[in-house]
Each structure stands twice: as C-alpha cells, then as structure tokens.
Image (cartoon, grey):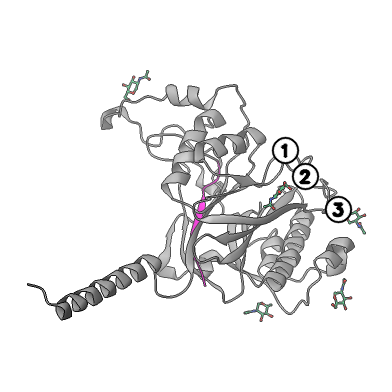
Amino acid sequence: MITTANSTARVKILALIFLIAVLIMVYPRSTQAGWTIRIQSWNLRYDSMPNDITVDETIAALNKTVPIDTQTKYYSDDTEQPWSTRRIGIKNEVLFNEVDLFTVNEGLHRQVEDLKELLDMPYIGVGRDDGAQAGEYQAIFYNPESIKLLSNDTFWLSDEPFEPSKYPGAGSYRSCTVGYFQTNKGGTKFVVINAHLDDQSDDQRRLGAALIKYRAAYEQETKKAPVFLVGDFNSQVSGETNGAYKITTGRLEFPIDRLNSTFVSKYNHSGSGFEFLDLIEATPVENRLGNLATFTGFKNDVDSFSRIDFQFGSNTSNWEAIRYKVGENWYDDSYYLSDHRPVISDIFLK
Ligand SMILES: *[C@@H]1O[C@H](CO)[C@@H](O)[C@H](O)[C@H]1NC(C)=O
Ligand SMILES: *[C@@H]1O[C@H](CO)[C@@H](O)[C@H](O)[C@H]1NC(C)=O
Ligand SMILES: *[C@@H]1O[C@H](CO)[C@@H](O)[C@H](O)[C@H]1NC(C)=O
Ligand SMILES: *[C@@H]1O[C@H](CO)[C@@H](O)[C@H](O)[C@H]1NC(C)=O
Ligand SMILES: *[C@@H]1O[C@H](CO)[C@@H](O)[C@H](O)[C@H]1NC(C)=O
C-alpha cells in the first residue's frame, strides 16, 4: 500500500523529471543562447537553353534504373545541360543540405519560380532589368520553418541605386537584394545581402562593393544585427581586379563622395568602423571543407577555375563562423549542375 508521504515524493520526482525533459527540449543544441543557421549561396547559371518542359515532365522522364559500375563513364559529360534538366539536381542539392537560406545569382524568372515550387520555399528579390520580372534575380529563398522575413528591398549597383539602372561601361544591370530576417527559435535578427557584381567593368565592381559596404554599415548600426554578404563578385581575392574584395574587407578605401548622394544621406551612419570578414577566414581551419575554386565553367579546364563567389560577415562579435564549404557542381555519374559551385556555411548567431 502506498502511503501519502510516498506518493507526494513520487509526484515531486515526476515533476522534476518533467521539468528536466522540458529544459532539454527547449535547449536542444546548446545551453548558450543563440542559433545556428545554414546559408547556401550559388550562381545557378541563367537559363541559356530555354524550353517549355514542365517540372512534371522532367521528373517523369528521369531514368529510374540505377546503373551498374561498368555502365557509368565517370565525369564523362561536361557539356552544359538546359535548366529544365539541371533544376532537379539543384533542388536535391539544396534540400539535402537542409539550408535555412538559399541565395541565387543569375536566376531568371522561370528559374526562381521553378525553385519556389521544387524547394517549397518563398523567396525575395526582383528581376534586375526592370525591378519586376525581367532579367536575373539575386533571389534569397528562406525556409519558413526556421526563418521569418521582416523586411526586404532591392538596390542597384550603379550611380542611380533606387531604380533599375546600369553603371556606364558595365555589361549588365546589376542589383542586390537585402533581406532582414529573424530566426523562429530564439528570435535572433540578422541581415543578408545577395549581390552579383559586373563581369566587364572593374569600376562597377568597386562602386558596387562600396555601396554594399556603406548600406551594410548602416544596417549593422541601426539594427544592431549581424550582416552577411553573399554572391558572385566576378573578380578574385588577388590580382589586378581585386578592388571589390579589398573594399569589402576594408583593405582599400572608396571615396564616399563618389556614391549617390541620396543613398549616402538615406543610409547615413556614424561611420565608426565597419568591414566584412571572409567566412572562409573566419571559420576555424579544422572546420573548412571542399573545393577552393567556385567558378569552373562547363569545361574540365582547371586553369580557368577561380574563387569569385563569396560569403562574408560583418566584423561584429554577435556571430561566429562554425563551418565553411565549397561544394560540388559535377558528380561522377552526371553533368554540371551549374558553371559555379555552391558555397555553404553554418553560422552561430549569438
Ligand atoms: C536507363 O539507365 C540504364 C542504366 O544506365 C540504361 O541501361 C538504360 O539504357 C537507360 N534507359 C534509357 C531509356 O535511357
Ligand atoms: C518584400 O519586398 C516585396 C517587393 O518589394 C514587397 O512586396 C514585400 O511586401 C516585402 N516583404 C516584406 C515582409 O517586407
Ligand atoms: C541618385 O539616385 C537617384 C535614383 O536612384 C537619382 O534620381 C539621383 O539623380 C541620383 N543622384 C545623383 C547625384 O546622381
Ligand atoms: C549624417 O549624420 C550626421 C549626424 O547625425 C550629420 O552631421 C551628417 O551631416 C550626416 N551626413 C549626411 C551625408 O547626411
Ligand atoms: C571593424 O572594422 C573597422 C574598420 O577596420 C574597425 O574600425 C572596427 O574596430 C572593427 N570592429 C570590430 C568589432 O572589430
């Protein structure tokens, strides 16, 4: 027979076990406050061989037979395939990585709409040629299960940043997407900027980098949130065209009076010091994985491989780079998913 004293003790023990279970559920990753987010950025290559094939038709035509080793020519097909074919591999790559944010460069309207369907994730961003659906999007997809969008906008990397515009001498209209987000768990806020700098004008790349850095410093100062910059710089860390990288990382000054004056006053900040850290450098060396080059082209020609796609974080102490990887765009039994490789990082937000 159970005495009253015994059952009170049991209730107390059960209550304690329940409390511990609740605490474990509330703090699954760490007892330190904060959350880790995974960002994958990828220049997808624009849809250069458009066709009318639907997603369902592509899936229906996939060969379900798994080949045996002798039927496979490893790394045989390095030719460009149409987007309608590539999109399935890209979708699987992103979903397999279980990302919180997926940013794309060179995505035309059809491409970002396909990904919205295939990934089942919303995106922000507009076509750079008209601020609506024309031209490439610097889209930012986010997983609504883990991330909430607070606000977003687009500006152009030109002398007229508030309207679709082209820098004199640039090959294309160039824009960037700014997203202000919050983690669902923990409610930590952060900003992501996704940009694509010009392939022809080094002056545009420098101006673009300076506009982004100026805006990022404003975001950091007014929101007190970390700012991450991702995208294709069309230029490298070293060599004659490394101005954009040097401006971004605070190794080269760009005169503020050469930026659009409306932009400068709208995003005015104290200027007490802001620069971006390259995430590969910010990540502990033992946590870096994968390739160095991010651009490969559609040729197995390693002499043209280069690191031109980056992820950066504000030089603030409210985040930590946990892991960094440049992934693959070409698997041994298939074809190039894009002419760029994806960059993936895990970032701890404090
Ligand atoms: C499907 O793949 C198998 C294995 O590689 C191959 O033998 C077969 O010919 C393929 N079928 C078609 C229709 O391409
Ligand atoms: C994001 O930007 C689009 C286009 O400017 C706008 O329609 C939408 O309301 C924005 N969403 C948020 C949450 O700010
Ligand atoms: C700044 O940009 C706006 C539009 O984006 C434009 O109307 C204005 O003329 C530009 N200012 C200067 C000084 O070029
Ligand atoms: C920025 O703000 C400071 C003080 O708040 C002011 O002195 C300065 O003139 C402003 N600069 C611009 C470009 O608006
Ligand atoms: C960030 O970089 C700027 C410019 O180099 C510097 O003035 C500032 O002290 C740095 N901030 C932090 C938190 O390291």
**Mark 1 and mark 2 residues within 8 Å of each other at the beta carbon:** yes
- Residue 291 % position (x, y): 46, 54
Which one is nearer the viewer's eye here, 166 or 95?
Answer: 95
Q: Secondary structure at mark 3?
A: loop
1 or 2: tag closer to the N-terminus: 1
Residue at left 58%, top 44%? 122
Q: Is residue 105 left or right of residue 165?
A: left
Task: Identify the amino acid type marked 1.
Answer: Gly
Q: Is residue 248 left or right of residue 285?
A: right
Q: Which mark is residue 160?
A: 3
Task: Identify the amino acid type marked 3.
Answer: Glu
Q: Secondary structure at mark 2?
A: loop
The quadrant in which the N terminus is found is bottom left
Q: Secondary structure at mark 1?
A: loop
3 or 1: tag closer to the N-terminus: 1
* Magenta stretch, residue numbers: 339-350
Which one is nearer the viewer's eye here, 236 or 17?
Answer: 17
Which one is nearer the viewer's eye here, 329 or 21?
Answer: 21
| Callout 3 crowding tier (Cα within 10 Å): few <14, some 14–19, many ≥20 | some
**Mark 3 and mark 2 residues within 8 Å of each other at the beta carbon:** no
